[in-house]
Image (cartoon, grey):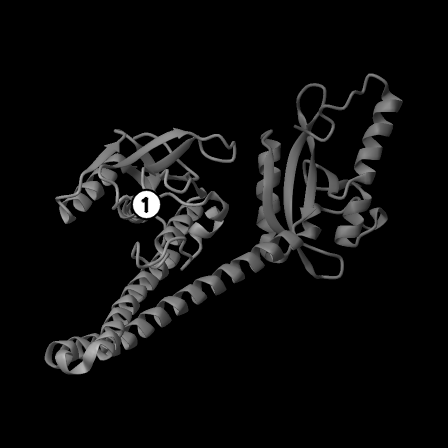
Amino acid sequence: MGLLDGIDMSGPATGLRLLSAIVASSDDAIVSKTIDGIITSWNPAAERMYGYSPAEIVGRPIAVLSPADRVGEIRDILDKIGRGERVSHFETVRRRKDGTTLPVSVTVSPIKDEDGTVIGASSIARDISEQNRTVAELRRRAQELERANRNLETFSYSVAHDLRAPLRALGGFSAALLEEYGRDLGNAGRGYAERIQTASEKMALLIDDLLQLTRVFGAEIHPQMVDVSAEATRIAAALARQVPDRRVQFVIQEAIWALADPSLIRTVLQNLLDNAWKFTADRSTAMIEFGTVPAKDTADAGICYYVRDNGVGFDSAYEAKLFEPFQRLHPTGDFPGTGVGLASVRHVVERHGGRAWAEGAVGHGATFYFTLGTTGTP
């Protein structure tokens, strides 16, 4: 499509005035040239961008704007124009009058006469300096974030390694103290030793969960089609084997697939099903369900996954706290855990471009929903 294409020229004076106004007011450099590359018109934006006035540049070859190492680009573009082709959004560098260079995105179109013969070319060039600076800044910040994540992961593993040894010592010595000297300690002494042992076990669990959260935050995403129904079935079977005497009915919808990182989506399902298993422990017959419903929010990708249970539920007023690290709505004595699992769920689905939320009521179970940025079928 050429510079004149689409302009109503049925009224010559009106059409030319309209065209002239468009060219003059454009923020992009609009230049026309002969098929040999001799500049024939030059709008005000071109003068601002390149520093040449029309009197200085019209009649000179367009190659004057090209750095010495890019003159070949001009020849290639003119060759394509001569064949009637169009060059769209070609990013290159142009040279100003003062010798400095400018990154631009150029679109060049052939100009044809009434017989369809190519007689010249029109080009529209946009200064992309700010765009390039923005991209460079985003790339720099991404690299900084990557370094920070690596440092955090290294720090977390180092701290975990350094803490495990003294924790094992605390747990071991408190257990030995209770076993060998428990009768001599009295009720208070035994209570203190038991508290030390419990605290060391809790700290070890917290370290494990911190490492899991660190791995989730730093993991790269490699999406592929995953049979999430099969994954949920495997996790449910493993949970049932842990406590064979529990009466738990799992209802898992078949043939649910998702485009996701296999390891990370497994982490989501593991945490949500573990959560449902834990909070239905006091039910005579527990019900845990995994399935999908159509997404209601147009920002989601069409499918909404859920894990539902008939457990103790939660006060919906505190729903936002559920996905924050180390936030718990139930006493540790009633239900074990550190509050890291749901934080991992939210982070994983957000990295996939989705979101996570929950609905529930005290004593009436809970439903945890999540979406993914991309979903599909195999």
Q: What x and y, as percent, mark residue 328?
A: 40, 55
Q: Is residue 233 left or right of residue 148?
A: left
Instruction: Give whichever of 169, 279 is nearer the camera.
Output: 279
Q: Nearer the viewer, residue 104 or 346?
A: 346
- Given residues 336 and 40, the one toward you in this image is 336
Name the side, left or right, on which 136 lies relative to 311: right
Task: Please provide percent x and percent y for residue 40.
Answer: 78, 39
Q: Quadrant of residue 307?
A: top left
Q: Position of residue 321 (x, y in %)?
A: 46, 52
The residue lying furthest to the top in this view is 10
Q: Residue placed farthest to the right in the image?
A: 13
> Compared to 174, does 244 lie above or below?
above
Instruction: Report which residue position mark 1 lands on.
Output: 272
Task: Provide the secondary structure element on which disc 1 rests.
Answer: helix
Tell me the quarter of the image containing the N terminus.
Answer: top right
Instruction: Specify few, some or many for label 1: CA neighbours under 10 Å numbering under 14, 14-19, or 20 or more.
Output: many
Q: Amino acid at mark 1?
A: Leu
